[in-house]
Amino acid sequence: MKKKKSYIGEGQKRFISYLPDEVFNSLTPDERESYRNYRQNQKNIGNSLIKISKYQDQIRKLNLLIKGEKNKINGDGENGGWEMNLKRYYERIIHIDRNFHLNCSIEKRDRSSVSKRIKEGIQTRVKKDHILKNTYGKKEIGPVIKLYGRVENLQNRQQIYLGDERKVRKILGELLNENFMEDPFEFVKDEMKSLLSQYSRYKIYHNKWEGFKGETHNLNSIIEWTIWCENNGINRYEWGGNKID
């Protein structure tokens, strides 16, 4: 007994069932072409819906493995799932995270002269007779932007002065063999944040917070440490940041 002709996606909206040869051959060339294109797209949708159904089933099973559910996984009784196991083991090593997890940030601060800020409308005059200067000594007054880093966890915080933004861009470019002079600040910020993370985690791990706070930290000390790592075979990327090949 011959089976009934069927197509993937039966029951879909705008579904056209199998056309007998007699009906198909009676179509005009344009209608045949349209029918072939229709059937191909209908097949693509049908196959995709089957894949979606399989993915949804896989997602459901993965959620069970993550969250855990009683009598649902291999019929082996209650299973807490990976998430519960993770929490249990994390509690045993949380002291490592408390000592090692740091939040590092980079911010810029405007340290331009009062005259510069008043002229640009950033600051209002404090005194009516305040004299606006165009030069400082023989040098024309320009914008002065300084960068600062901050390293902290729940118990401790340390600010690190990095200096003039253009100097940071120049030194960072020399260190990484790239040109950061015209890049958006976010690029510079990300690279410096990566360096600061590596530097501070290494230093705090070896010297504890007490030793770290008792040392002098600035852009030079970070760069010197980075070069020291390279000369001594230390992979600084193991201490934080992302290495881009």
Image: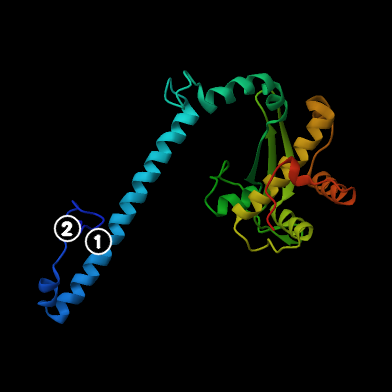
Residue 161 in view (yes/no): no
Please give left or right for residue 174 compared with residue 46 in the image.
right
Question: In the rendered image, which quarter is residue 148 located in?
Answer: top right
Q: Residue 149, how many percent across, how many down?
A: 69, 41
Q: Are marks 1 and 2 in contact (CB under 8 Å)?
A: yes
Q: Earlier in the sequence, mark 1 or mark 2?
A: 2
> Is 157 drawn above or below residue 112 in the view shown?
above
199 or 141, nearer to the observer: 199
Tag 2's secondary structure? loop
**Residue shown at 76% from the left, 62% from the top:** 177
Please give left or right for residue 159 compared with residue 86 in the image.
right
> Disc 2 marks which residue?
15
> Is 83 drawn above or below residue 134 in the view shown?
above
> Disc 1 marks which residue?
42
Residue 37 in view (yes/no): yes
| Mark 1 vs mark 2, CA separation in Å | 8 Å
